[in-house]
Image (spheres, rainbow, N blue to C red):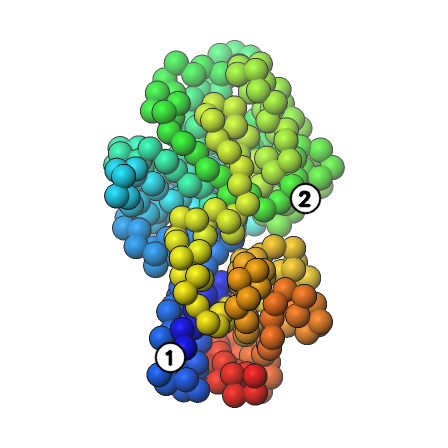
Amino acid sequence: MRILIAPDKFKGSLTAAEAAAAIAEGALRVYPDAVATQFPIADGGEGTLEAAVAAGYEERLNAVVGPILAPLGAAWAIRKDDAGKVTAVIETAQASGLAEMEPTPDNALRAHSYGCGQLIAAALEAGATEIVLGLGGSAMSDGGSGALRALGLKPLDSAGNVVPLGGGSLADVVSLDATGLDPRLSATTFRIAVDVRNPLYGPTGAAHVFSPQKGADDDAVELLDAGLRNWASVLREATGRDVNVAGAGAAGGFPASFLAFTDATLEGGFALVAGLTGLAGELAGADLVITGEGSMDSQSLTGKAPIALADAARERGIPVIVVAGRILVTLEDLTGHGVVAAAQLLDVAPSPEDAIANAGKYLTWATTQVLEGA
């Protein structure tokens, strides 16, 4: 039997790679002669870098400016394929992540994506001709302006001064000096993983929907939304491109600047990561798929990585088993996606706290139990 073990992360407990190892241990207790392939997956947000590294990309580390100026080390990955194409994978959460910032109204206005731009510059220096940007877990609401500033763009106010970093300053931008913008950007393919449909600004835009999670109060939300609206206007005047499109509101509007100044494309996160990592080839040879994540809920059913994988397996007639930290949807919901059995850590752990603290142990146990009963 060939078992493809392909979970997403168990947020707060296990990385996707750690989850895969725990599931594999449980599966091999039941099927000791099986070939169990561990293949961490992601949907384009946090965990994308880990999935790329697990698939053979070379991990690198650069010192960058964090979301509120404190320096930090940020990882990214790169690989050259047989045809000579060099692809880099960068996560916004690595350089400009919410985990690096206390979520307060002041910080929500100050946070920026400059460090992400530094990682892009490092990738260009390393010869990357294709850059994949995984969005998620971001601290900023700056429309990607900080990233382009790290690459040479100067946003100017009415006096001709460069405005401070952060989304709170975007309302003061009246013009752009792009003379120093890195010319390699125009020759680079940017593929941006986006699984939300929010526009850049407005009632369903980046500021109103996502910035409260980053510490913004009502006043900060309005300031950030006004700034993103103005940023879209300035970008349109400079490039002729309308960036207030579906998906541009992801990661604090990060895609907007790249939609304006590069030929970036917005792509579904799971499909993008699956293509990068060669998941389709692994799936083609599987007799059984085991997947999972920390919380299997209604949002999971909208195309998050485990369910997207289950759908792909169902199309090939491969049965799927789900093992999750908790399952908040019905078995009927899962059956519609080709899932034949499911288990949660809360079935075997004495408490939610214990399930989180000892997730690896309980994930192994739950996997064994669900396979024995399947």
Q: Position of residue 12 (x, y in %)?
A: 50, 66
Q: Position of residue 328 (x, y in %)?
A: 68, 70
Quarter of the rendering occupied by the N terminus: bottom left
Element type where label 1 sits in the image:
loop
Q: CA distance from mark 1 to mark 2?
A: 46 Å
Q: Secondary structure at mark 2?
A: helix
Residue lying at 36% horizontally and 25% vertically, measured from the top left? 187
Query: Vertical placement of 49 versus 120: above or below?
Result: below
User: Can see residue 213?
Assistant: yes
Name the N-terminal-most of marks 1 and 2.
1
What residue is at 42 percent from the left and 22 percent from the top? 153
Q: Which mark is residue 34?
A: 1
* Residue under pointer 2: 209
Q: Identify the residue at image location x=35%, y=20%.
A: 183
Q: How busy is the neighbourhood of tag 1: few (under 14 within 10 Å), some, or many (20 plus)?
A: few
Q: Quadrant of the C terminus?
A: bottom right
Q: Is residue 247 left or right of residue 69?
A: right
